[in-house]
Image (cartoon, grey):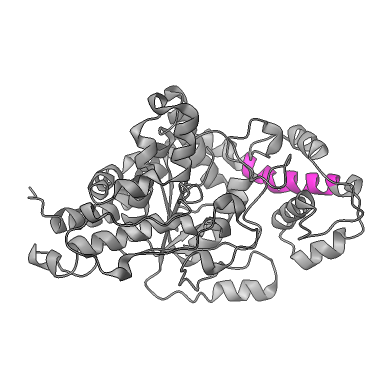
Amino acid sequence: MGRSVFSHFLILSNTSPRFPSSMLRGQIPSRYFKKPEQIHPRNLPSGLGSTSFRCRCSVALPETNSSSESSSSSSSSPISAVKKRIVSGVQPTGSIHLGNYLGAIKNWISLQDNYETLFFIVDLHAITVPYEPKQLSESTRNTAAIYLACGVDTTKASVFVQSHVRAHVELMWLLSSATPIGWLNKMIQFKEKSRKAGDENVGVALLTYPVLMASDILLYQSDFVPVGADQKQHLELTRELAERVNYLFGGKKWKKMGGRGGVIFKVPEPLIPPAGARVMSLTDGLSKMSKSAPSDQSRINLLDPKDVIVNKIKRCKTDSFPGLEFDNPDRPECNNLLSIYQLVTGKTKEDVTEECREMNWGTFKPLLTDALINHLHPIQVRYEEIMSDSAYLDRVLVEGATKAADIADATLNNVYQAMGFLRK
């Protein structure tokens, strides 16, 4: 099940892509060239500022703390009658773990109250690497059930499967014709995976993977895409591609083709979740929690039974410093475990600091274990209920895909028209 689709954007090269002259239809003005800071993702600091991405987004997620102040602020939403739109999703590969949940899905629950939200299972992305076909369908259903078990409300959000809305693939092909190959060749993840596996073992889909990601977002005219603070630059390819297509085919050119003119795609902004969205490995506080890590001991899976959680926390990596504290660069594991405790209890950072300052690991680990078990138990119970009612789950996915397709088809028809296709 694994990574959030918009938190696993293939990492851009240290050098921002450029439009090759051979790809241009006339000279594109300089304002369409983006120059994000040259930051290698592996060297990103935990408190990354906004200099790496020209983010104009001023939207903040609702507070997750259960104070009266936060309750009143969430009830008086600043959103206008026409809600802003947000899309996000998770791959149906591996197991959905605590990092996926705290970094993405848990935040969706707050977002769905104030935004128009579409949450989908990105099964088309799952086949870009070797996979077991017989497991894909099962994993897709499991992921959808976890969305609902975690609190995604189908009266507020559309939940669907990516491949059930065919416009994703169609738009990807259209966008591929406008995507310079040089942009894709510079993607670090593609270069690393192809180098390890060899060209004979890497499919073309791994190279064009970012274009499908762009399609996922642009199809729905998304205003915001939830991404981690360390992943803001991953959205840059989508933004550049949107502006490129708008320039090449939009405006007066589109109007001459019989369209309304103006922009074809809305250029999305990153929406940065609250601190703590980046959950690290239990065996290495400097590495992000990941389903691809070889040891299951490195992560807490949402469906882990009680005894497994107890064992993983008991054996997780710690340090020999006295007391417990946040934000000490020499204590990454300490910061990670305190952050997890803060997020699953809903306490403030200040409260956790005060509560745990004088604790040792022998006292804190059972406390964290109980908090995790108590937080995940209702999700696990609800998951079993949903999985036992296949008709309900099927109905949710059909209804979600129908709503999503209405939006996606409108965008796709505009693109076909602007690009000059003869429509039947």
Question: In the image, which residues are magenta?
Answer: 365-380
Q: Position of residue 209 (x, y in %)?
A: 38, 42
With respect to residue 234, does 369 lie above or below?
Answer: above
Q: Position of residue 322 (x, y in %)?
A: 92, 54
Q: How many marks?
A: 0
**Position of residue 283 measured from the top left corner of the image (x, y, whole percent):** 74, 39
In the rendered view, would you say 343 is above or below 194?
below
Q: What residue appears at the point 64 percent right and 72 percent down from the top-left corner?
A: 70
Front in this rendered view, residue 125 or 191: 191
- State whether residue 399 appears in this view: no
Is 265 situated left or right of 365 in this image? left
135 magenta-colored: no
Q: Residue visible at 48% across and 49% down?
A: 11
Q: Residue at x 38, y 46 (%)?
A: 210
Residue drawn at (34%, 39%) of the image: 163
Dominant secondary-structure state across the stretch colored magenta: helix
